[in-house]
Image (cartoon, coloured by chain):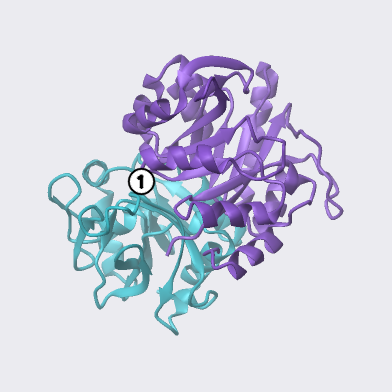
Chain colours: A purple, B cyan
């Protein structure tokens, strides 16, 4: 059977990985290529790169880096950040990305999802949703989680999947950074309404949190995290081993 | 030299890079002579069957591929490229493939439990036929990366099986003609090792 995926996420700004990293065995901890290679070798199932650069120059740099990563790392790569048009899809796919993640771009123009799905297939289009509880409902936030869009999240995700999103990353703003575990309630609510892979993000503080995620929601597909991997708080080989011991199917 | 046939479908960047990573010269090409000169041929493919097969036939390279395959040159189809080696596909209708491998391509939908997600996307384990040169560098149970909604049923030409609600053909092999449903260029070291095994085949 298909395995549960573990996905490190790298935020790239002006060609460097930000959020700080702490690796003993890497010379250049903020080099996206070195980090990608490290993760690929230690068993990451997929990598996500977010381009958080705002400038034109930074964006060009990101493209160069993506090409370099894709020429050296042979696991699936998802790219997000600043994806607003099908031309943006084209640009990153040509550099070796396998999937493209849309967030604010889809909020501004929901047709982007159907257009991209028609051109590149549903499997290529990943909806990334930043969600926070407001007045007793799940709400979609934009601009990196700073702006309440007023859109109800569950209905929004359902609509995006119907339009062609082939995968959904659910990032809970409520649990993000708290490191006390994934947002099981929110993830379960999303899982119930869609029949495409759902990737859990936000809240993992330990390997046990991943085990709890897949135990409590057995048909969750993947867990994504950034800083706990970057700071070596959780090592992917140890995490995979713990998951295996708990009867979770891993690579 | 390995020729990766370029017929305007999909992105061949990772595929070319993966041959480079195992020290093999690979060329993405739509030139018939180049393909004839190559030691081995890769038929890639993503997207829809009908569209891809049409595009390939429009270039005339399907005939070159068949000619070279009949001469005994090692050929490998990848993902939709593998499906195109078969006789027919039932993806949105019924479409004729290249017919180099016997059998049909059918949808997961209706064949597997409806709680399973389609496409079959992610890492899954291979059950390989032992002692084949192409699998010299991998072992039974190794994981590879799949993305597909249609599959080939298991036949005597199946050389690796996989399970997703049903048991299907993950890789096929008949004489010098091979196909992988999964993406070796996205399957980490295991994938590179399969390409290495393919590159070392005689023919």
Quarter where residue A115 is shown: top left
Whether B129 is drawn above or below A27: the answer is below
- Expressed as whole percent of the image width and height from the top left, the position of residue B145 reads 47, 57
Of residues A127 and A155, the one nearer the viewer is A155
Of residues B117 and A112, the one nearer the viewer is B117
Q: Residue furthest front?
A: A136
Q: Is residue A16 left or right of residue B66?
A: right
Element marked by disc 1? loop
Q: Classify the position of the C terminus of chain A by image quarter.
A: bottom right
The answer to whether any part of residue A133 appears in the image is yes
Q: Residue furthest left?
A: B94
Of residues A233 and A172, the one nearer the viewer is A172
Q: Chain of mark 1?
A: B
Q: Classify the position of the N terminus of chain A by image quarter.
A: bottom left
- Expressed as whole percent of the image width and height from the top left, the position of residue A241 reads 65, 67
- Expressed as whole percent of the image width and height from the top left, the position of residue A41 reads 67, 59
Residue at the spot of label 1:
B46
Whether A190 is drawn above or below B174: the answer is above
Residue at 62% across, 30% down? A173
Of residues A236 and B152, the one nearer the viewer is A236
Q: Is residue A28 left or right of residue A113?
A: right
- Expressed as whole percent of the image width and height from the top left, the position of residue B69 reads 30, 66
Whether A59 is drawn above or below B143: the answer is above
Residue at 67% across, 18% down? A54
Residue at 60% across, 62% down? B22
The answer to whether any part of residue B25 appears in the image is no
């Amino acid at each position: 059977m298909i395995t549960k995926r573990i996905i490190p996420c790298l935020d790239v700004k002006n060609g460097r990985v930000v959020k700080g990293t702490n690796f003993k065995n890497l010379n250049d901890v903020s080099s996206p290529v070195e980090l990608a290679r490290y993760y690929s070798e230690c068993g990451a199932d997929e990598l996500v790169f977010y381009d958080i650069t705002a400038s034109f120059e930074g964006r060009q740099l990101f493209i160069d880096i993506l090409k370099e990563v894709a020429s050296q790392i042979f696991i699936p790569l998802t790219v997000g950040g600043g994806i607003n048009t099908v031309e943006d899809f084209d640009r990153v796919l040509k550099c070796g990305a396998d999937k493209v993640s849309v967030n604010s771009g889809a909020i501004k123009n929901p047709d982007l999802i159907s257009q991209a799905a028609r051109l590149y297939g549903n499997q290529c289009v990943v909806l990334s949703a930043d969600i926070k509880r407001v007045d007793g409902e799940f709400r979609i936030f934009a601009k990196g989680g700073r702006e309440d869009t007023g859109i109800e999240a569950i209905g929004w995700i359902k609509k995006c999947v119907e339009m062609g999103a082939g995968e959904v990353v659910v990032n809970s703003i409520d649990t993000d950074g708290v490191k006390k575990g994934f947002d099981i309630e929110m993830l379960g609510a999303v899982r119930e309404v869609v029949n495409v892979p759902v990737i859990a993000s936000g809240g993992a503080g330990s390997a046990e949190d991943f085990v709890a995620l897949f135990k409590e929601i057995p048909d969750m597909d993947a867990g994504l995290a950034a800083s706990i991997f970057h700071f070596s708080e959780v090592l992917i080989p140890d995490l995979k081993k713990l998951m295996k011991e708990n009867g979770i199917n891993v690579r | 030299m390995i020729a990766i046939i370029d017929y305007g479908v999909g992105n061949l960047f990772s595929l070319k890079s993966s041959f480079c990573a195992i020290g093999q010269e690979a060329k993405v090409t739509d030139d018939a002579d180049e393909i004839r000169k190559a030691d081995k041929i890769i038929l890639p493919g993503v997207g829809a069957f009908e569209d891809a097969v049409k595009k390939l036939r429009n270039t005339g390279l399907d005939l070159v591929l068949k000619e070279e395959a009949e001469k005994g040159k090692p050929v490998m189809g990848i993902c939709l490229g593998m499906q195109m080696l078969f006789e027919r596909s039932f993806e949105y209708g019924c479409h004729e493939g290249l017919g180099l491998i016997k059998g049909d391509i059918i949808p997961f939908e209706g064949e597997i439990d409806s709680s399973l997600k389609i496409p079959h996307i992610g890492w899954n384990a291979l059950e390989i036929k032992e002692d084949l040169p192409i699998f010299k560098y991998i072992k039974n149970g190794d994981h590879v990366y799949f993305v597909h909604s249609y599959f080939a049923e298991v036949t005597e030409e199946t050389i690796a099986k996989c399970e997703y609600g049903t048991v299907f053909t993950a890789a096929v092999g008949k004489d010098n003609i091979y196909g992988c449903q999964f993406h070796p260029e996205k399957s980490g070291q295991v994938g590179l090792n399969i390409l290495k095994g393919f590159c070392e085949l005689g023919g």
